[in-house]
Amino acid sequence: MNLIEINNLKKYYATHKAVDDISFSIPKGSIFGLLGPNGAGKSTLLRMLTGIYYPDAGQILFDGKSFDPLKDVGLIGYMPEERGLYKKMKVGEQVMYLAQLKGLSNSDAKNKINYWFKRFEIENWANKKIEELSKGMQQKVQFISTVMHDPKLLILDEPFSGLDPINSLLIQDEIFKLAENGTTIIFSTHRMEQVEEICDHIVLVNLGKKVLDGSVAQIKQDFKKHLFRVDFAEPINFAQVATHHFTIEKSQPKSLVVKLNEDSQTNDILRHFINQNVTITYFEEVLPTINEVFIEQVNKTGGILA
Amino acid sequence: MNKIFIIIKREYLSRVRKKSFLVVTLLMPLLFLALMIVPALLAKNSSSNEKIVVVDESKLFANRIPDFDEVRFTFSDQPFDSLRNTYLDKGYTGLLHIPQMDLVRDPNIVYYGKGQMSIMTQSKLEGKLDAVIEDIRMERAGIDKSKVEGIRSNVNIISKTGKDEKEGSAGLALAIGYGSGFIIYIVLLVFGMMVMRGVMEEKTNRIAEVIVSSVKPFQLMMGKILGIGAVGLTQFLIWIFLIWGLSFSLPLFFAGSDLTTAQSAGNNTAMMMAVKQISVIAQSADWGMITFCFVFYFLGGYLFYSSLFAAVGSLVNEDPNDAQSYTFPITLPIIIAIMIMFQAVTNPTSQVAVWGSIIPFTAPVVMMARIPYGVPGTVAYWELILSMSLLIIGFITTTWIAGRIYRTGILLNGKKPTLKEAVKWIFKNN
C-alpha cells in the first residue's frame, strides 16, 4: 500500500522546467530518500507535496485520494531546508502557535508539548526565547514543532544540518521510531552515508527528471561493477595473479580489488588463488556506495555537482 | 478563517505585550501634553531676561515704550557713541539707537545687541514704535485720537452653510482637517512600515516556509495586516482615552493652584468665557460624520497601503537598503497626498483637492482635510460616495496584487527580484 503516488507531475517556470514529468510512489511506513544535486527540482517537488505550490500538470494521490492541500495539511509535517523560528518568541508559545496552525486544539497541543518536551528533556526551556538557544537546541524545537501533530507524512529536508553528532543521533533515533509506528518519512539530503543508513527506498532526480528509483539494496545491486576484494595472509607477487578470470583494479601487498571478467564466476577467483597456494583471509563483493551511484548518474544525466 | 484568527492573535499579542508598545503608548500623550503645557508655564514664570537701553536723540519717545514679555527698556541720557562700546559691560543685552527724525519720513532706527533680536520681539517692538509715531503724527495733524478709534472697524464674518444654515467656523474646520489628515498620513507610514518589517522578519528568519506549509500565504499576509491594524486601533483608543482624561483633570489641578493668587478670579472668568466660546464653535462641527469618515479612511487607507508594504517586504532580502528602493514608489503617493492636503485644508473645493480626495492613492489623507468643512456643503455626496467606493475597490485590488507578489516573494531566497519580475508574478499561477 502506498501513502503517496505521484503521477506525471510537472511544474514549469519561465526559464526552466523545475519538475518535468516525474512519477513515483512511496510505500506506507517507509523511509524514503529524495536525492539530487542542488537545483535538481527537489525543493519544488517537496513544495508541491506540502501544498505550497500547485502542480502545472499531473496528480498527487495521498492515501489513495487526490491530494487536497487545504484538508490534508494537518496530515503532513514539513521541515524545510531553509527553516527558522520567531527569534523573539518564547519556545512554548512558538510551538503552541505552530501546533494551532496545524489544527490542534489547545488542550491537545498542550499534551503533545508536554510529551515531546519531556522526551527531549527540555521542559525548562518553555519560557526561554528562541534567540537564547544554541543552533542545535533550536533544531530540536523545530523538529518537535514538525512532528507534534502526529503527521502521517513527515517531510524532512536536510534534517541534520547544523546538528552535532549526539543530537544527530537523537533525531535519527526519533525518525526510526516514527517509521516503526507507521509514519511515512520523506528524507531529502546531500549526505549519502546517511541515506544508506536510514533510507529503505530512494529516488534520484536531476534537471527536473527522475533518474533512479528503487530500494537501496536493489540499486546497489543494479549498479555493481563486479568488483571483489581479496585479502591474503602474506604478500603476493605479480606472477601469482595472471589469469583470464579477472583484472586487477587496485592492489596492495596483502590486498587486492579485482574485476571479474564476463563469463567467469565468483568462485573462479577463489579457485585461482587456492591453486596458487596463497592463504585467503578475507573475501567480499565490493558494492558501489550510494554516493558513487549518485555522482555517476548525475554526471551521466548532465548535471553539475555543486 | 480560524487560522487567520490564530495569526492575527499572535501578531497582535506579540506587539502589544512588548515593553516598547507600553512605553510609546503611555509617553505619547504625556509628550503631547508637555508640548502644550510647558511653553505656557515658561511664559508665566519667566522673568525679564532682555534689558535694552534706549538712546533717544529725537526726544519723542521718552518713556513711551512699555515693557513687554521678557523685554525691559531703560532710557539713557548718555551719548550714543560712548554707550555703543559699554552697554554690554553695564549689564544690558541690547542698545536701541533712535536718531533725530523729522516725523515725515520713516526713521532709521538701529538695534545693537549681543545676538539677533527674535523675529517676534522685533515685530512687537516695531509695532510699539509705530504706535508712538502715529500718535504724534495725528497730534501734529490735529486729528483727535478718540475719533480715529471710533472710526476703526473690525468685521467678523460668520458663515452659515446648507439649507438649515448651520453656523460653522473655518478655523475649526481647518484644525480638524489638518489634524485628522496628518494622523492618517502618519498611520499609513508608521504602520505600513511595521507590516513591511514583520514580513521581512518572517522571510529572513526563514519561518515563512514552515508556516505556509500550514496556511495559505494569503492568510499569513492578511493575518499580519489585520493584527497590526488592530495594534494601531488599540493604540489610538488608549491615546484618545488618556488625552481625554488628562485634559479634564489637568485644568482642574491648575485652576486650584491659581485661586491663591489675587487676580485669578478675573483670569478664570475670562478662561470660562473662552471655554464656552470654544464649545459653541465645537458643537457646530458635524462630529458624527467626521468620526465616521475618519474611521473609514483610517481603515481603508491602512488596508490599501499596508498590503503594498507587505508585498515589498516579501521582495526584500537581508539588506535593508533594498527595502528603501522598493518602498519609494509606495511612500511617494503618500507624500504627494500630504502635500495636496496642505492645500486642501485652506482651499477645500479646488480642483486638486477634489480629485485628490477621490483618487484612492491620496484620498484617505486629502478627504479628511475636506470633510470638516461640511458634507454635503463643501464635499458633495457624490464625491464622498465615489471616493469611498474607489477606496474599497482600491484596497481589494492592492490586496489581491500584493497577495500574488507575496506568495512568490516570501519563498524566494538569494537573488533580489527586479520590479519587472515581481509584476510578472502577479499574473503567474502558483
Image (cartoon, coloured by chain):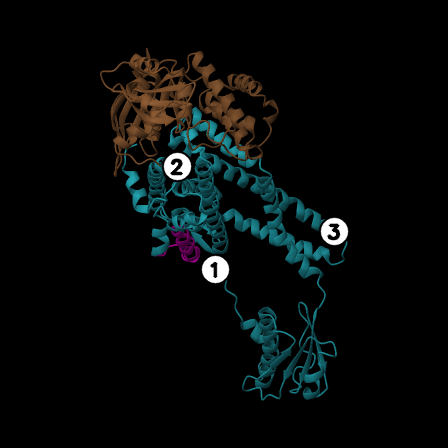
Chain colours: A brown, B cyan
Task: Give the x, y percent position of residue A152.
Answer: 40, 16
Q: What crowding class fits label 2: few (fewer than 14 Cα within 10 Å), some (14-19), or many (20 or more)?
A: many
Q: Do pointers 3 and 1 mark residues of a single chain? A: yes
What amino acid is labelled 3 in the image?
Ser
From the image, tell me which residue sits under label 2: B410
Determine whether label 2 and label 3 are within 8 Å by CB.
Answer: no
Host chain of mark 3: B
Which numbered tag is attached to residue B257? 3
What amino acid is labelled 1 in the image?
Ile
Which numbered tag is attached to residue A187? none
Q: Nearer the viewer, residue B48 or A58?
A: A58
Task: Choose mark 1 or mark 2, whichever is in front.
Answer: 2
Residue range in magenta is B332-350
Q: In the image, is residue B262 above or below residue B81?
A: above
From the image, tell me which residue sits under label 1: B157
In primary-sequence order, the first of circles 1 and 2 is 1
Task: Choose mark 3 or mark 1, whichever is in front.
Answer: 3
What's the distance in space between the residues labelled 3 and 1, CA to CA?
38 Å
Q: In the image, is residue B239 above or below residue B161?
A: above
Secondary-structure class at tag 1: loop
Image quarter of the C terminus of chain B: top left
Secondary-structure class at tag 3: helix
Task: Give the x, y percent position of residue A198.
Answer: 42, 19
